[in-house]
Image (cartoon, rainbow, N blue to C red):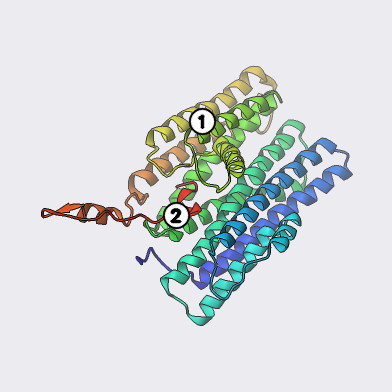
């Protein structure tokens, strides 16, 4: 088996702990904010905040349960580790603690591997497969809960001038969750696959993070501005989500083992595409990405212009100029980092690519038997970066 990069180190184990802390901090701060809104009589704000928490949690529990069942069916677990029974799996996910169970499994198995010095590639790939499943769920939760939560809290602060310390803590935790989940997914995903080159740490990781943060942030701000102009703008956001979902159907994604779950997956991808671009089929999408960011940038830049035209009173507020500047600056920086990352730092070549060229089926007049490709796993079919 070809090694695809570094092993599951003590630092990686500690990073898993940090990711768990960020996740807990985000959920707890949002829940406390919900309670605060209820106590102060802001029922609608409290309900919306709670809806985002519940929707994100329900989605990741459904996928987590399905993946546990798939792994159990395919005997995709380590020897000596018995799979969870169906009844226990149902109970864990009904109680909304499926993701914590996954954290427990990953931390326990990786700790044992580090303690025993298990550096074999199959052990390392198994650990990173567990980490990637977890990072996939965190990515879902981020775009279903953390990102919409930021839009909601920004709207409350800017439109209703309602500010509290807990709001800022909640927003800070959401932002940290976005940054961490994005980078963690990127690192785990490529390391868990045998046929692709792992992205190096350091500058490429930093550039990728900056590209995502500087393109997602103006998106959040511009959507907030549209809602400030009219709450009916949410219908437009729903239309963008619908387009992203339809795109998933057009691309004929095959991530899930059941068709019903595939519908939920495509709907979730539609939500993610409202805020950022991901390659949902692992194919060349240079043109698709270009179209996406042209449309996204146009909407981002139109938001402050429309705010000044249709809500001129906002020009006298303390947030108007900083938001205008930041949308223009952040969008430009994000596109700049995007170009830098994909032109110089993105690992395009697959590990097996050179073998396919060197080992063609006809070599020196001798016909070779075609090599049977390994069946795709959900890791191969998930969002590419």
Q: Is residue 111 above or below residue 146?
A: below
Q: Is residue 259 above or below residue 189?
A: above
Residue 330 x, y percent position in the rendering: 51, 38
Relative to the observer, which residue lies in front, 133 or 13? 133
Q: Please identify the quarter of the rendering in which residue 164 is found.
A: top right
Q: Residue at x 42, y 44 (%)?
A: 282
Q: Along the polypeptide, which appears first: circle 2 or circle 1?
A: 2
Q: Please identify the quarter of the rendering in which residue 307 is found.
A: top right
**In this rendering, position of residue 385 left or right of residue 259:** left
Q: Residues within 10 Å of mark 1 (few under 14, many from 20)?
A: many
**From this viewpoint, which residue is outermost toward the bottom?**
116
Quarter of the image that includes the N terminus: bottom left
Q: Residue at x 56, y 34 (%)?
A: 245
Residue 189 x, y percent position in the rendering: 47, 56
- Which label belongs to residue 117? none
Q: Residue at x 59, y 73 (%)?
A: 81
- Which label belongs to residue 296? 1
Secondary structure type for disc 1: helix
Residue 380 x, y percent position in the rendering: 45, 51
Relative to the observer, which residue lies in front, 118 or 367? 367
**From this viewpoint, which residue is outermost toward the top?**
309
In three-dimensional space, the C-alpha distance between marks 2 and 1, rounded to whole angstroms, equals 23 Å
**In this rendering, position of residue 275 left or right of residue 319:** left
């Amino acid at each position: 088996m070809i090694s695809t990069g570094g092993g599951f180190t003590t630092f990686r184990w500690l990073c898993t702990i940090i990711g768990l802390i960020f996740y807990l901090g985000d959920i707890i701060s949002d829940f406390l904010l919900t309670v605060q809104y209820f106590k102060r009589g802001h029922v609608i704000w409290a309900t919306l905040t709670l809806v985002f928490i519940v929707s994100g949690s329900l989605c990741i529990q459904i996928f987590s349960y399905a993946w546990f069942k798939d792994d159990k069916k395919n005997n995709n677990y380590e020897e000596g580790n018995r799979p969870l029974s169906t009844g226990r799996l149902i109970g864990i996910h009904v109680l909304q603690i499926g993701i914590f169970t996954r954290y427990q499994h990953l931390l326990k198995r990786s700790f044992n591997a580090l303690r025993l010095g298990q550096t074999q590639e199959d052990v390392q790939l198994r650990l990173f497969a567990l980490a990637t499943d977890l990072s996939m769920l965190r990515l879902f939760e981020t775009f279903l809960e953390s990102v919409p939560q930021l839009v909601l809290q920004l709207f409350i602060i800017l439109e209703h001038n309602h500010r509290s310390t807990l709001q800022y803590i909640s927003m800070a935790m959401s932002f940290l969750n976005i940054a961490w989940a994005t980078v963690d997914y990127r690192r785990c995903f490529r390391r868990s696959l045998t046929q692709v080159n792992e992205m190096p740490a350091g500058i490429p990781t930093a550039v990728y993070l900056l590209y995502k943060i500087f393109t997602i942030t103006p998106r959040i701000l511009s959507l907030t501005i549209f809602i400030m102009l009219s709450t009916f703008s949410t219908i437009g956001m729903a239309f963008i989500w619908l387009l992203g979902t339809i795109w998933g159907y057009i691309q004929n994604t095959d991530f899930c083992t059941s068709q019903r779950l595939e519908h939920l997956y495509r709907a979730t991808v539609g939500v993610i595409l409202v805020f950022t671009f991901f390659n949902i089929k692992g194919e060349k999408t240079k043109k698709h990405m270009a179209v996406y960011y042209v449309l996204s940038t146009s909407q981002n830049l139109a938001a402050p212009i429309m705010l000044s035209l249709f809500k001129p009173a906002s020009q006298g507020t303390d947030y108007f100029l900083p938001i205008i500047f930041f949308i223009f600056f952040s969008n430009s920086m994000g596109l700049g980092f995007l170009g830098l990352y994909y032109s110089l730092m993105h690992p395009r070549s697959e590990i097996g690519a050179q073998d396919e060229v060197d080992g063609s089926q006809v070599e020196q007049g001798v016909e070779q038997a075609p090599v049977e490709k390994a069946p795709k796993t959900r890791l191969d079919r998930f969002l590419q970066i």
